[in-house]
Structure formats: C-alpha cells, structure tokens
Amino acid sequence: MIDRAISLYRDRFSIIGLFENALYPEIPETLAAIRAEGCQTYIVTSKPHVYAQRIVEHFGLSDFLMVSMAVN
C-alpha cells in the first residue's frame, strides 16, 4: 500500500504538483537586479533536476537562475 501511495504521489507531482506553488512578490525583479550586478544565481533544491528545471521555466525564471546538479 505504501508503494502504491508513493507512486500515486509521484505521478501527480510530475504533472500537476510541481506547479502548485507561487513566487514571493517581486522575485523576478530582485533576481534581475542581482544579475545586473554581475552575480550568478542558482537553484538549490532537493527536488530532482528535471523537476527543478521545469519549475524554473514555468515561472519564467530561466534568464535569472542556473539549475545544476550537485555531485557528492
């Protein structure tokens, strides 16, 4: 039953759940200002790379953020 629940969660998250969030106010403007100062900005998340990339693209942040995978 636990394996089925995890599978259902992952199936839903991969299509709908990853977009069920919102940006804090003025995030795009703040990231643009930081980048204009010459700083690099990255995503740090425990989510799989494929989901992090899709979320960044969905919220129009690709020009501001680099999504890279950490290697242990």
Image: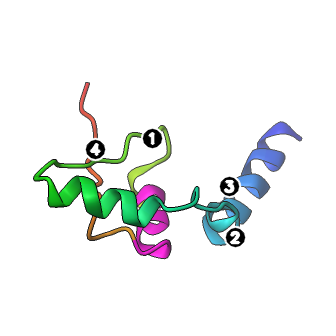
Sequence-earlier tag: 4 or 3: 3
Mark 1 to mark 2 CA distance (whole Å): 18 Å
Instruction: State which quarter of the image contains the C terminus.
Output: top left
Answer yes or no: do the residues labelled 4 and 1 have beta carbons within 8 Å?
Answer: no
Which amino acid lies under the numbered mark 3 shown in the image of this protein? Arg
Mark 1 to mark 3 CA distance (whole Å): 17 Å
Q: Nearer the viewer, residue 56 or 3?
A: 56
Query: Does 13 appear above or below 47?
Result: below
Mark 4 to mark 1 CA distance (whole Å): 9 Å
| Residue at the disc numbered 2 | 16
Point 82% across, 49% down: residue:
4
Point 57% across, 60% down: residue:
25
Q: Where is residue 38 shown, x and y percent of the image?
A: 10, 53
The residue stretch that appears in magenta: 51-60
Which amino acid lies under the numbered mark 2 shown in the image of this protein? Ile
| Residue at the disc numbered 4 | 69
